[in-house]
Image (cartoon, grey):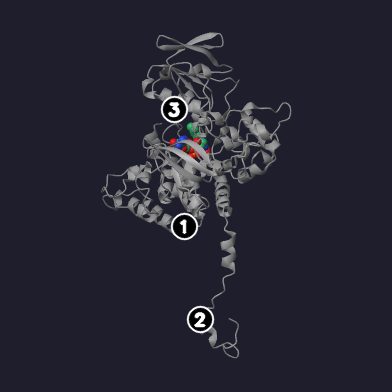
Amino acid sequence: MSDERERDCATPAPQQPQAPTRIDRRRFFHGAAALTVGSLSAPVALAQTAAPQGGASARAPGTNELEAQTRRALRWAGRDPADWVRPRAGAGADHNVVIVGGGQSGVAIAYGLRRKGVGRVDVIDQAAPGQAGIWRTIARMHQLRTPKTMLGPEQGNVALGFRAWFETLNGPEAFDALDRIPRLAWADYLAWFQQTTDTKVRYRTRLIEIEPQGDLLRLHLDVEGMRRVETARKVVLANGYAGAGGPAIPGFMRALPASVWAHTTGQIPFETFKGKVIGIVGAGSNAFDAAGVALEAGAAEVHIFNRRAFIDYQAPAPQTPPAQPPAPVDRGHANMLELTYELPDVVRWRNFLAGERRVASVPLDSLERAVAFKGCHIHLNASLADAAMAGNKITAKAGRKTMRFDYLIAGTGYRIDLAAQPELKQIHEHVALWLDRFKPAPGDENEAGAAHPYLGAGFEFLPRANTGAEYLRNIHCFNLAAALSFGIPVGDVPSTVDHPRLVQAIARDLYVENIDIEAHRRFINLPQVAPNAAPYERAVEGGLKGAAA
Ligand SMILES: Cc1cc2nc3c(=O)[nH]c(=O)nc-3n(C[C@H](O)[C@H](O)[C@H](O)COP(=O)(O)OP(=O)(O)OC[C@H]3O[C@@H](n4cnc5c(N)ncnc54)[C@H](O)[C@@H]3O)c2cc1C
C-alpha cells in the first residue's frame, strides 16, 4: 500500500487550492501549514483552516465540527497563564528554556511549559519546515507500532488528542475500524496539534555544542548557515532516538564506500533498487519496514540477516491466555508508566536487561508486507561479515557462504554513547552514568546499560562525583538515553506520560532559583490598605468611627 492510499483511510481527501492568504488545507494536513502559520494565534489559525474552499460542499466532512470542537476545548482550557518566571539574577539569559528538537516530544513539552506559565521557551530544530521528527522521513511503516488508544501529547485535554481529531474528521466507526494509527494520519495529527496549540519552532536551527558558563548554558547554533551563540538557563534534549550517540552501525559497513550502504535512520535510495540485490543486517521492525519498501520498489532479492534463531514478531492476542503468570507490575504497567522511575535501581536495571535480551518485536503486518514477496529471504542464526567491494558489487560472508549485494542496509538500531554526540563534546565526561552509580550483581553486567546516563527525577543529567559540574542539572535529557532511568523508550508515544514530570521539574527549578528573600519580606510586611467601607458601612455596629482599620 502506498503512502497516498494509506492517507485515503486516514484523513479527508485533499482540497482544491484556495486563496493565498488562507492556509492551504492539503498542506495543513501534510503538516507544512503548521510551520508557515506558526506565528498565528490558535483561533486565527483555526479560522483559516476552516476557510471555505469553493463552497461548503468542498469542505471535508467533520472539518466544521473539528473547528468548533477545538475552539470550545481551547476556550474551556482557558487562557495560558502569564509568564511568572523571574529573570535570572546577574547576567540575564536569552531564554529560560531551549528545547532541542521540534518533533512530537519537543512540541508537546513546549506546550506543557506554556500551560505552566513558563515563558521565554524556544524550540529549535535543524530540519526544514515540514521535515522535523521522523514520521514523514525515516519511518517507513504503514501504521504506528503502538496501540491506537494510547494517549499522546494532549496533556489531559482529550479534545486535543488523536482520537478526538480522527473521529471528528472521519467518524467513530472509522476509528473503530483502525487496526493501529496510520503513520501519515499521525503526522497530520501532530501538525494539527502544533498549529492548534500555536507552538512555534525555529526551523533550520541546529545546536552544534553546549558550553557551560557558570550555571548558564551557552548554545552554539547554526541558524540557516550562520553561526551564533545564545544563552539559556535550561536545555531540553528532545532530539530523538539517535540523539545520544547516533545509530549503531556495524564496523564492516563503515569500511565500505558511503554510496553502497545506509542505516535505516538515513535516506535510502529505494528508487534505484529495481532488479537489485539488497542485504539487510538486523531483523527488527525498521529492518522489515526497509525490506518492504525495497521490495515494493522492485528489488529482485532482499536478504535479511538475523543473529537469532527466530523472528520475534507481535503475534495476535491468543484466544486463551497463556498459562504463564502475568508479568509483575514493576516490569512496567500500562496505567502507571510514569512511576517506573521510582523503582529501585536493581529493578530498573533488570527491566533494561529484559529489554536487551529481545529485539523489539516486529508488528505482524510489517513482517507480512515483506515476506509477501518471493524475493524476501530471511537468514536465521546468520550475520554478515568481511564485506568488501568487488567491482560495483559488495561481497560479504554469511557463515561459510560468500554473497554478493548491490546495497546494504543496517537495521541495527541505536547506541547510547554520550561521548559520540557532538553537542555534548565539552560536557559528556562529567555526566554521571549508570556505570558510576550502580554495580550490577555478577551475571547482570551489561556494557550498553552502563553507558546510559543516570538521570535525576526531572530527566536532568547529574554530575559525576567530584566534578562540581552542577550546571549539568540544567540539561534535561528527553531522548532514548533516558530509557534505562525511566523504564520506557523515551520519545515514544507512551512516554508522553512523563511530560508533566519534566515540565514540573523545570518549573520547580526556575521557581526556587534566585528567590529575593528581602523583597519577599518587604512585600508581606506592607501595611494593608483598607478598601472603601461604603458597601458595608451601614451595618457596622456603632458606625465606622473607631472600627479597626
Ligand atoms: C522508524 C521508527 C518508528 C517508530 N515507530 C514508533 C511507533 O510506532 N510508536 C511509538 O510510540 N514510537 C515509535 N517510534 C519511537 C518514537 O515515537 C519516535 O522516534 C518519535 O519520532 C520520537 O519523537 P521525538 O520528538 O522525541 O524525536 P524525533 O521525532 O526524532 O525528533 C527529534 C528532532 O530533533 C531534531 N534535532 C536533532 N538534533 C538536533 C540538533 N543538534 N539541533 C536541532 N535539532 C535537532 C531533529 O531534526 C528532529 O526533528 C519510532 C521510532 C523510529 C525511529
Q: Residue at x 52, y 18 (%)?
A: 251
Label 1 C-beta lies within 8 Å of the nearest ligand 1 atom = no
Instruction: From the image, tell me which residue sits under label 2.
Output: 532
Q: What is the distance, in whole Å, between disc 3 and disc 1 at their CAs? A: 38 Å
Label 3 C-beta lies within 8 Å of the nearest ligand 1 atom = no
Q: Residue at x 71, y 32 (%)?
A: 439
Q: Residue furthest bottom?
A: 542
Front-most of residues 386 and 70: 386
For the residue marked with disc 3, what is the amino acid?
Answer: Gly
Asked if residue 179 can be seen in this view, the reply is no
The label shown at residue 266 is 3
Q: Secondary structure at mark 3?
A: loop
- Asked if the residues shown at circle 2 and circle 3 are in contact, with their CB atoms under 8 angstroms apart, the answer is no
Q: Residue at x 53, y 46 (%)?
A: 151
Q: What is the distance, in whole Å, between disc 2 and disc 3 at their CAs? A: 70 Å
The residue carrying pointer 2 sits among few (fewer than 14), some (14 to 19) or many (20 or more) residues within 10 Å by Cα, namely few
For the residue marked with disc 2, what is the amino acid?
Answer: Asn
Q: Earlier in the sequence, mark 2 or mark 3?
A: 3
Q: Earlier in the sequence, mark 3 or mark 1?
A: 1
Q: Earlier in the sequence, mark 2 or mark 1?
A: 1
- Asked if the residues shown at circle 3 and circle 1 are in contact, with their CB atoms under 8 angstroms apart, the answer is no
The residue carrying pointer 1 sits among few (fewer than 14), some (14 to 19) or many (20 or more) residues within 10 Å by Cα, namely some
Q: Secondary structure at mark 1?
A: loop
Left/right placement of residue 439 relative to residue 338 reads: right
- Quarter holding the C terminus is bottom right
Instruction: From the image, tell me which residue sits under label 1.
Output: 80
Q: Residue furthest front?
A: 90
Viewer-side label of 2, 1: 2
Q: Secondary structure at mark 2?
A: loop
For the residue marked with disc 1, what is the amino acid?
Answer: Asp
Residue 272: x and y, percent? 37, 21
